[in-house]
Image (cartoon, helix red, strand yellow):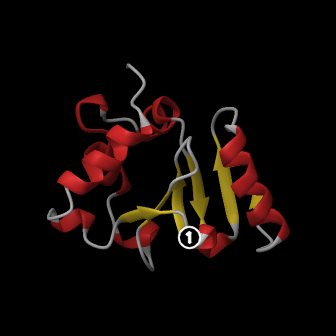
């Protein structure tokens, strides 16, 4: 699987915004404690309250990754260089070495919000 750029992910989110499964999914740089994914450049992808419980996260990732999507959640997360954030559990999951920008956000999650690596 070729690596997708963060800009392509944002573009795919914009293109899929009208899809029912993407309702409420957005990206930005505010509220790291509510994020679901952290892109390599530090962009936060959020999905609103209950994202992990009310959505098919594989389908959301597939829409986010577009032509780079697969059927396997972990493969997609690895290829996109994402960090997962589980706000309800105050945890984050790192699948590969975080970028400097991701690490800055993780430090904030730990120091300000009390998150731990899960």
Residue 95, x across and y down, in percent: 63, 37
Is 59 placed above or below 20 here?
A: above
Q: Residue at x 56, y 70 (%)?
A: 30
> Quick one: quadrant of the N terminus?
top left
> Quick one: quadrant of the C terminus?
bottom right
Q: Residue at x 44, y 77 (%)?
A: 50
Residue 16, x across and y down, in percent: 19, 55
Q: Residue at x 32, y 59 (%)?
A: 56
> Circle 1 sits on which residue?
30
Q: Quadrant of residue 57?
A: bottom left
Residue density around tag 1, few if under 14, some if 14–19, many if 20 or more, within 10 Å: few
- Residue 20 as seen in the image, left or right of residue 116: left
Is any part of residue 111 visible from this angle? yes
Is 14 placed above or below 21 here?
A: above
Q: Secondary structure at mark 1?
A: loop
Front one among 4 and 91: 4
- Residue 65 as seen in the image, left or right of residue 106: left
Is 47 placed above or below 78 here?
A: below
- Residue 115 as seen in the image, left or right of residue 56: right
Front one among 65 and 55: 65
Is any part of residue 118 visible from this angle? no
Residue 94, x across and y down, in percent: 66, 43
């Amino acid at each position: 699987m070729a690596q997708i750029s963060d800009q392509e992910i944002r573009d795919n989110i914009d293109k899929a915004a009208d899809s029912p499964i993407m309702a409420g999914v957005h990206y930005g740089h505010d509220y790291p404690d509510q994020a679901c994914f952290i892109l390599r450049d530090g962009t936060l992808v959020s999905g609103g309250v209950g994202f992990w419980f009310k959505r098919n996260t594989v389908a959301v990732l597939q829409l986010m990754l577009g032509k780079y999507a697969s059927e396997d959640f972990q493969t997609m997360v690895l290829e996109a260089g994402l960090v997962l954030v589980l706000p309800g559990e105050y945890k984050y999951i790192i699948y590969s070495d975080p970028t400097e920008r991701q690490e800055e956000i993780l430090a904030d999650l730990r120091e300000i919000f009390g998150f731990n690596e899960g």
